[in-house]
Image (tube, grey):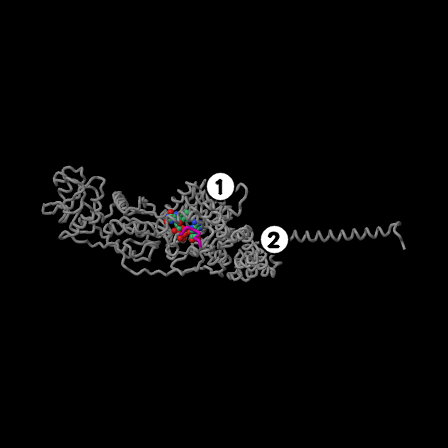
Amino acid sequence: MARGRCHPHALLLLLLAAALAGAPPGGLYSPGDPLVLLQVDTLESSVLNSSSAWLVEFYASWCGHCVHFAPTWRALAADIQEWSPAVNVAVVDCADIANQKTCGKFGITGFPTLKFFKAFSKSPEDGTKIFHPGDSIQNLRQSIITNLEMHKETWPPACPPLEPASVEEIRGFFQTNNVTYLALIFETNESFLGREVTLDMLQYENVAVRRVLSSEEELVKKYGVTAFPSSFLLINNGTFSRIPVQMEARSFYTHFLQRLPGVTRGPYMPTRAPDTPIKTTPIPRKPADRSKVYMADLESALHYALRVEVARFSVLTGERVRALKDFVAVLAKYFPGRPFVQNFLRSVDRWLRNVRGSRIPYSALKLVLTNRKEGQAPAVLSNNVTWVGCQGSEPHFRGYPCSLWTLFHLLTVQATRHRRLGTDPLEVLGAMRGYVQSFFGCRECAQHFEGMAAESMDKVRSVDEAALWLWSRHNRVNARLAGTETEDPQFPKLQWPPPELCHPCHSVVKRRQVWDEAAVLQFLKAYFSPINIFLNYTEPETALVVRRSREAKEGAGEWAMGVGMEVGGSERRGFSGPRKPSIVRMNPKMQELEEDIVDLDSFSELHYKSKALKAAAVAANKGRQLSKRDTIPLLLADDSHQAFDYAAAWERLRQRGLGSKQLIGALEEDEGDTLRRSHWFRMLGVGFSRLDVSLCIILYFLSSMCLLGMYTFFRMRTRHRKGRPSFPTA
Ligand code: FAD
C-alpha cells in the first residue's frame, strides 16, 4: 500500500477507538461487537475534528426497528472492519438518559438515524443522514463509499484514492510508489467492486489497488481485458498477469492479495473491542400482575412522551404544534391521573391553547413542562421512568412503546365513559395518530401505524368503535412482530386478551376461533378503567412535590431530562406501595361489573381528591415545622395512608351484591375517619377561600337576625291582639 497516505493520527485514533470500545455496554450493542460504543462524553470528541470519517447509528434501545436493524449494523461493522482508520462505525444509545441531551444536539429526532461525519467535521450539524434502503449491508457499504468520495480538500489521510486510475498514473506508478504489487480492477462505472477492494486492502503494506473503468480504452487494450469486472496484478519488475480467482468477487480478490509474498498488515489494528466481560447491574424485577394496569407505566409514558420525545425538536412548527395541542388536550380531558398530574396536564393544555401562531420553541414549552407556579395548586408530573407492567426481561425489551400502547388504550376507553352527544369518535384516535406521526421516535413503527390509520381509521363511527379499532390494530402489530427479535421471550406477542384474561372474548364459530367483540369491548372497559390502575412504585405525590421544590431551587433544568430514569438496576425514588388485590378478570358476571363501573369516574375522582385533601391537611399540620420558604404545601413522604384499599373494598361489596355507590360511601367513610379530626381546619383552610368563609359568617349572622326579628314580630303581634276589646278579658 502507498505509505504516503498513512497518517500518524490514525494510530492514535485506533487506540482511542479500542479504548472506547471497552466502554460500558450501550443497550443493543456490547463491547464484544466490532464497532465503537459512543456516549455523552466521547461522542463529540471522537466524531468531530477526527482524521477519519465516522458512521454513527443513533438508536433507542426500546425501538423495535433498532432491534431489527442491530444485526445488520453489527454485520456491516464486521464487514468493513478493515476500512478503519479511514472510516469508523459507531453507535450511540439515545434512550440512555445520559445521552439524550447530546443526541438532541446532533439533531436526532427519530430512530434509527445513521449519520456520516466526514473527516475533520467541525460541528454536530455537519453529519449527513444516510438512508438505509432495505437494511442491506451492500447498500450501506456503497453509501459509505459515496460519502467518502464527497471529501474534497479534507480527504481522510488514511484513506487511499478511490477515483478511477488514468493511463498516466498507471504508467509511472512504480516510480512514485514504493510497493511491489499493483492490482488493477477493471470494471464499469457503476460498479463498487474496485473501491471496496481498495478499502479492504487499506491496512496492508506493499500492495496497492486501483480501479480502471471500462471506458479507459488504452488500458483495456493493453491488458487484453474482455470481461468486466476482471483484475490484473502488476509487479514492480514489469511483469503482469490476470489474478486467478474462481469468481470475480470482492472476497476472492481480497483473499488473493492479502496472501501475496511480502504483503503484510500495517501497524493499524482493527477497531475490534477487547473481549471484556460486560458488567451490568441487573434491574431487580418488580412483581407485576398481567391483569392490572400500573400508574408508574402511564406516568413514565407521559414524562417520556412530553419531555423526551417532544424535546427532540428545538422548535415545533405547523403540523407538530397541532399534533401536540390535540394530544395534550385529550390527555387533560381523559387521563384519570393523580390530582397533581391532572393539574399538570391541564396547565400544559391551557398554556398550549393560549399559544397564538404555529411556532413553539421547545425552550418555552419546557418552562411549562417543568414549572411549578408558586401559590397555585401543585401541578407535578414525575420525571422518574419506572416500568412495572411494562418491565421487560432485558433492558431493551418493552418499556416505552409498551407504556404508550397502554396509555392510548386507556384514553380510548376513557372517552367511552365521557360520551356526549356530538362527541367526535375520532377525537382520541386522531390525537394519538398525530402524536405518533409527529413525535414517536421509532419512525418505521410510525410509518406502519400511519398505514393502518390511513386505511381504516376514518370508518370509525363511535367511541366504542374507536376503542375496538385500536385493540384490533394493536393485535395486528402483535401478529406481525410475534417471533421476531423484538419479542421479549418472557412476554410473547399474543393475540390479546388471551383466554386466561378474558374467556368470553373468545368464541368458536364453525370450528374457527373468533373474537366476541361485545365481550372484548366490555373487557377493555374493565381492564382500562381507573379502578384497575395500581399505584405500586409511583413516587407519592407528597414526596414528589417536596423533591420538585428542592430541585427547583437547585436548578430545574435537568428535571425535564428525567433524572429518575432506571439505569443499571438502581431503583430510584420509586415507591413500592402496598399491593392491592387483583380485581378485574373477565368472568360470566362481567355484565354486572360493567354496569357498576359506569360510575367509576366519580369514584376515582373522589378517591384521588380525598387523598389530596388528606395530604393537604396533613401537610398543613406538618408544614409549620418545615421551612417557610416552601410556598407550596409540603406534604408527608409517608404514604401509609395513601392507599384506600379500593380494590379490596370493591370486591367485598360485590360479594355482598352492592355496587359503586356503596363503594364511594365506603371510601368517604374511610377518608372521613382521618379527615374528621381536622374537619374545621379543612373547611376553613382548604376547600374555601377567606372571602367564602366571611360570606358564610355574614349570612349566618343575617339569618340569625332574621329569625330574631320574626320572633320579636310574632311576640308583639300576640301581645297586641291580647289588648283588643273583642278579646275576653278577665
Ligand atoms: P405491547 O405490544 O407493547 O403491548 C403493551 C401491553 O398492552 C401488553 O402488555 C398488553 O397488556 C396490552 N395489549 C397487548 N395487545 C393489546 C391489544 N390488542 N389491545 C389492548 N391492549 C393490548 N415495533 C416494531 O418492531 N415494529 C412496529 O412497526 C411497531 N409499531 C408500533 C406502533 C405503535 C403506535 C407503538 C406504540 C409501538 C409499536 N411498536 C413496533 C412496538 C411494539 O408494538 C411493542 O410495543 C414493543 O415491542 C413492546 O412489546 P410488549 O411485549 O411490551 O407489548
The residue sitting at the right extreme is 730
Q: CA distance from mark 2 to mark 1?
A: 43 Å
Query: Which residue is found at the position 59% from the left and 61% from the top?
Result: 673
Q: Which residue is mark 2?
A: 688
Q: Earlier in the sequence, mark 2 or mark 1?
A: 1
Considering the numbered disc 1 on the image, is that residue within a helix, a strand or a loop? loop
The image position of residue 202, as x and y in percent, is 20, 49
Span shown in magenta: 494-499
| Amino acid type, callout 2 | Phe
Residue 673, visible in the rendered structure: yes
Is residue 212 rendered to the left or right of residue 397?
A: left
Q: Quick one: label 1, few (<14), some, or many (20+) residues within 10 Å?
A: few
Residue 402, visible in the rendered structure: no
The image position of residue 297, as x and y in percent, is 45, 54
The image position of residue 485, as x and y in percent, is 34, 52
Mark 2: C-beta under 8 Å from nearest atom of ligand 1: no
Is residue 282 rendered to the left or right of residue 274?
A: right
Labelled pair 2, 1 in contact (Cβ < 8 Å): no
The image position of residue 57, as x and y in percent, is 32, 49
| Amino acid type, callout 1 | Arg
Q: Which residue is mark 1?
A: 461
Task: Specify whether residue 135 is painted magenta.
Answer: no
Mark identifier at residue 179: none
Instruction: Kindly report which numbered mark, 2 or 1, lies closer to the viewer in this rendering.
Output: 1
Identify the image quadrant of residue 30: bottom left
Instruction: Point out the image quarter for the C terminus.
Output: bottom right
